[in-house]
Amino acid sequence: MTENELIKILKTLNALKPSEEFARLSRSGILSPGTSISFDRALQPGIFSRGISFAASLALAAVFMLVLTIGGIAGSLKTLFLPTLNVVDNESLVSEADTITNDINIHLSEIEYFEQTRQAVALAERPVTEHFAAENEIDRLLNEVIEY
């Protein structure tokens, strides 16, 4: 660490100032011989801050007790405010899922049927010359077999 860096650090530390109460207590303790200063007493929280801390603790305990109480009666409150619906049970959900699955299967089979129909129509719409060319090829091959 160089001398310039040390001077910069000391200047930044010089900007720190103690609180007025700490300075007053320190001054009175230094100037009055034979008396000891109780810094602990000066730094202890006041009655106001202790009261706020006590109130916050009570509020937190009350909220905790409220959550425990509501958690214990949540089941009865649930049935009171949210009655169970007759249509919402396992059997009805399974039957609804089966119905949906059957509908999907029907749509898939229709898609397959229409695809097969489209392919058949595409074959039927091919030019007639291709059919004749294929027949001519078959005739030629049959003639070769007969001549053999």
Image (cartoon, helix red, strand yellow):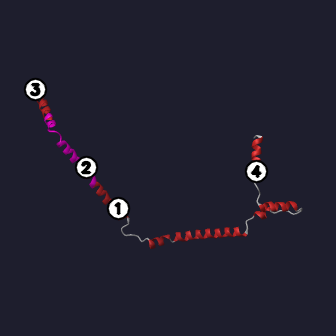
Left or right, residue 31 beside residue 9: right
Badge 2 amino acid = Glu
The disc, 3 or 2, on the residue closer to the chain's N-terminal end is 2
Residue 112: which disc?
A: 2
Please report the residue visible at 62 percent of the width from the left and 70 percent of the height from the top: 59
Q: CA distance from mark 3 to mark 4?
A: 117 Å
The disc, 2 or 1, on the residue closer to the chain's N-terminal end is 1
Segment colored magenta: 106-133
Element type at marker 1? helix
**Residue underneath mark 3:** 147
Q: Residues within 10 Å of mark 3 (few under 14, many from 20)?
A: few
Q: CA distance from mark 4 to mark 2?
A: 84 Å
- Coordinates of residue 135 in the picture (x, y in percent): 13, 35
Q: CA distance from mark 3 to mark 2?
A: 46 Å
Q: Disc 1 vs disc 4: which is toward the camera? A: 4
Element type at marker 4? helix
**Residue underneath mark 4:** 13
The disc, 3 or 1, on the residue closer to the chain's N-terminal end is 1
Furthest residue in direction right, as rendered: 33
Badge 1 amino acid = Val
The disc, 3 or 4, on the residue closer to the chain's N-terminal end is 4
Furthest residue in direction bottom, as rendered: 80
The disc, 4 or 2, on the residue closer to the chain's N-terminal end is 4
Residue 94: which disc?
A: 1
Left or right, residue 44 beside residue 117: right
Badge 4 amino acid = Leu
Q: CA distance from mark 1 to mark 4?
A: 75 Å
130 part of magenta stretch: yes
- Coordinates of residue 35 in the picture (x, y in percent): 87, 63
Q: Residues within 10 Å of mark 2 (few under 14, many from 20)?
A: few
Left or right, residue 140 beside residue 95: left
Residue 142 sits in which quadrant? top left
